[in-house]
Amino acid sequence: MFARRSAIVPERAGSPNAHSQKTLVLHHGARNYFCMDAHLEQLFDFLRFPSISTDRAYSDHVSACGEWLYTKFTSMGLRADVNGTPGHPIIVARNGHRADRKTVLIYGHYDVQPVDPLNLWDSPPFEPVIRDGRIYARGSTDNKGQILAHIIGVEETLKRDSDLPVNVIFLIEGEEEIGSPNLGAFLQRNREALRCDAIAISDTGMVAPGVPTLTYSLRGIASLEVKVSGPAMDLHSGIYGGAVMNPISALARMLATLHDAEGRVAVPGFYDGVAPLQDWEKESWAKLPLDDNAVWEITGVPELFGEHGYSALERVWARPTIEINGIGGGYQGEGTKTVIPREAFAKLTFRLVPNQRPEQVVEQVRKHLERVSPAAVRVEFSGGHTGEPFFTDPNSAPAKAAQRALVRTFGGEVALIREGGSIPILQAFKDVLGAEILLLGLALPDCRAHSPNENFPVENFAAGIRLNQALLEELSR
Ligand code: BES
Ligand code: ZN
């Protein structure tokens, strides 16, 4: 196990080592990037939109952010459309296509996750700043910095050559962070116009700074919300405590049965058919410059925890999990309130690996929770977004081209990895467009996606621009 080592504990928000330097001017260390200041200005403009897709209160900001992309694309000489959906718009842009060229679709998202807890940010989430070579803002790494690098790569190539080596289609949606509810139907309706040879996505990670990384598998996702209710109204806990079951206690007991003491999921059937890790994966991952110790340092936990028999990376990348993402009920305000609440709820998500089906897993967990629920409470369920696990061949011809582009950009040897996050639309890309999917991540393990102080290294933004240029060249061959 890993002992606590204070000397190398990573900077924590609010800790004494958390630097308080807050600056709005662009300065990015000793290196002077040609044109980078102009590119960074653009990124800052993009980051200033609070495009939080899950919260209706931000709808206008999400649309405005989509409009910004539309303007950006047209100013580069691309033909662009803002496609309305029942949710947030899908922006599509393309150069002049020629039948004798390969077509590359570049996918990304302009929506972001909510920013709470706001008090843990060292600078406001929608006022981007650079500190120590990193751009701090919500969406900087997931996904605005990564997708804008591709856009600027294309812009620079067009400026230099007045043309691109391939036909390009940008498809940038505003609903990835809520499970892409409208993109599948859009792909179906526009399958001819979106026909392509490869789909390039930078919305994943690299294992360490400067290490070229190709991701060939992502976990799928499914979600379930459980609500436990008892009394018809909140009750005085002195007048009724002892007579009725507290819904929070009932929920806590139920949730505690989801895992055994060692962190293995205890829901019957959950691991049925789960594809085992292959030997070459175990061997090559053990050599990566990212190990359990790094995971321990970045997360700040006293010690790592999870299913026995696997390293932390193996558990995150190739094993399924159940997480409780939120729990609520009862009094949350200051001081005490002697109450038995009428209801309690929990929000659960499941990360799935090849051979698990989202619907089947949701059903297994629902049945399990029903079975362990006490008779003294009522239990209701509601489902949320789902996404199939993704797995592809890292040695296909397009994947080989992607690897060459990665080596041209970063040097060294490509790390072939799986990752634990999900991009739910990938299955629809495969089913509807049938093109090979290339995940060329630019995020670092400590970029804090979805967390306070999300950040993206200026260096990775610059590398992403070069990566786009190398990738389009390699894919054109
Ligand atoms: N960029 C992430 C997906 C990701 C994260 C891939 C880490 C690889 C490593 C994406 O924006 C994301 O956060 N997806 C959500 C999907 C969910 C809300 C349906 C996720 O994984 O939680
Ligand atoms: Zn995300």
Image (cartoon, rainbow, N blue to C red):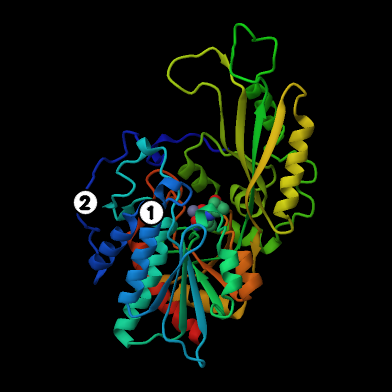
Query: Where residue 198 sits in the image (x, y, percent)?
Result: 55, 77
Q: Residue at x 35, y 59 (%)?
A: 64
**Placement of the N terminus among the 4 image quadrants:** top right
Q: Residue at x 51, y 92 (%)?
A: 99
3D distance between C-alphas at marks 2 and 1 = 25 Å
Residue ranking furthest to the bottom:
100
Badge 1: how crowded within 10 Å, few (<14), some, or many (20+)? some
Residue 476 point in image, percent of width and height: 49, 86
Mark 2 close to ligand 2, CB under 8 Å: no
State the residue in front, 207 or 195: 195
> Could you tell me if residue 316 is visible in this image?
yes
Q: Secondary structure at mark 2?
A: loop
In this view, the residue in front, 453 or 335, is 335
Q: Which mark is residue 42?
A: none
- In front: label 2 or label 1: 1
Marks 2 and 1 in Cβ contact (< 8 Å): no
Residue 60 is tagged as 1
Q: Secondary structure at mark 1?
A: helix
Q: Which residue is mark 2?
A: 24
Figure label count? 2
Labels 2 and 1: the sequence-earlier one: 2
Q: Is residue 364 left or right of residue 237?
A: right
Kind of residue at disc 2: Leu
User: Within 10 Å of the Cα at label 2, are there few (<14), some (14-19), or many (20+) other Cα atoms?
Assistant: few
Q: Position of residue 174 (x, y in %)?
A: 46, 59
Q: In the orientation shown, which residue stands out farthest toward the top?
A: 239
- Say which amino acid is labelled 1: Asp
Estimate the x, y position of residue 90 in percent, counting from the top left.
47, 65
